[in-house]
Image (spheres, rainbow, N blue to C red):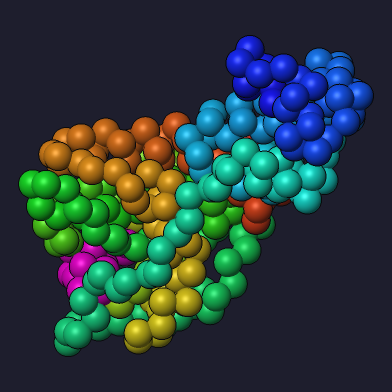
Amino acid sequence: MKQHQTEFSIVRMCKVFEVSSGGYYDWKRRENNPSPRKQQRAALDAKVLYLFQKSKGRSGSPNLVEDLQDLGMRHSKNTVANSMKRQNLRAKAAKKFKATTNSKHNLPVAENLLDRNFVASRPNEKWVSDITYLWTDEGWLYLAVMIDLYSRSVVGWSMSERMTTPLVSDTLTMALWRRKMPEGVLIHSDRGSQYCSHDYQTLLSHHKLVCSMSRKGNCWDNAVAESFFHTLKAECIHGERFKTREQLRRAVFEYIEVDYNRNRRHSAIGFISPMAFEAKHA
């Protein structure tokens, strides 16, 4: 009726739609003067939309609750979830894990010393590492990461067009330099040939690091690294097209060094970022 009020009289349209003219004008008055509750809902929706877009569509209701709290706005998870539903906002979701490394080899393997104990009481106590593959129009690009279980921070990473030993060695070397050459760190990975290679094992021994490996074919033994890759692909890779490997390298760099380490909230460390967690407990 409001849309066609310039073409037809309100009285006539009310008769056609069998509604009272008084009811229409009451509705119009309420529309122009929304109730305090509607005003509060609109303000919440605006903040939720802003924070959702700021996270590049990566934050679900739990993280948005924490973001709102930082702004002095306390709302329950259900309230924020309802706001997202009203605005048709859905966080990017992860896809199923696929194995990448080759464990069919005759190289020596290490015992599973980590044994799914993904909790660390201090920095540089336990690191986990893994490799995944990412597609570009130029072909595959492989990514290896090293994660500190204390803060879930990615302390080392490397990318290459080939899934060879230098990929994981460079990742470990970066982590060692970034963490000022710690000794005695438990380094856990799967049984891939890259991690079992002579060069990688020599690097571990040279820096007095302790090697741990998952049981054969058991991705849950390295669940934290797998979870990171799920998150990376959901929030940075899926739905995007990368024409060149260099374009993908830049996207991964920004995600790890800016979005993930500095800003992304992590449930395992109290819904703050890895960098904030380490600063808080320094």
Does residue 66 show up?
Answer: no
Instruction: Indicate whether 41 appears above or below 111.
Output: above
- In percent of width and height, residue 156 lies at 37, 46
Q: Which quadrant of the figure has residue 187?
A: bottom left
Task: Give the residues in magenta.
Answer: 192-206
Nearest the camera: 175 or 245?
A: 245
Instruction: Indicate whether 44 appears above or below 240.
Output: above
Principal secondary structure, stretch drawn in magenta: helix
Which residue does the image show at 62% across and 60% down from the upper left? Answer: 120
Q: Which quadrant of the figure has residue 7?
A: top right
Instruction: Indicate whether 11 appears above or below 146.
Output: above
Nearest the camera: 132 or 60?
A: 60
Which residue does the image show at 59% across and 72% down from the upper left? Answer: 117
Nearest the camera: 235 or 282?
A: 235
- On the rendered image, what quadrant is the C terminus found in? top right
In the image, is 113 to the left or to the right of 168?
right
Which residue does the image show at 23% across and 43% down from the upper left? Answer: 241
- In percent of width and height, residue 77 lies at 77, 49
- In percent of width and height, residue 230 lies at 42, 59
Which residue does the image show at 54% across and 28% down from the upper left? Answer: 54
In the image, is 108 to the left or to the right of 207?
left
- On the rendered image, what quadrant is the N terminus found in? top right
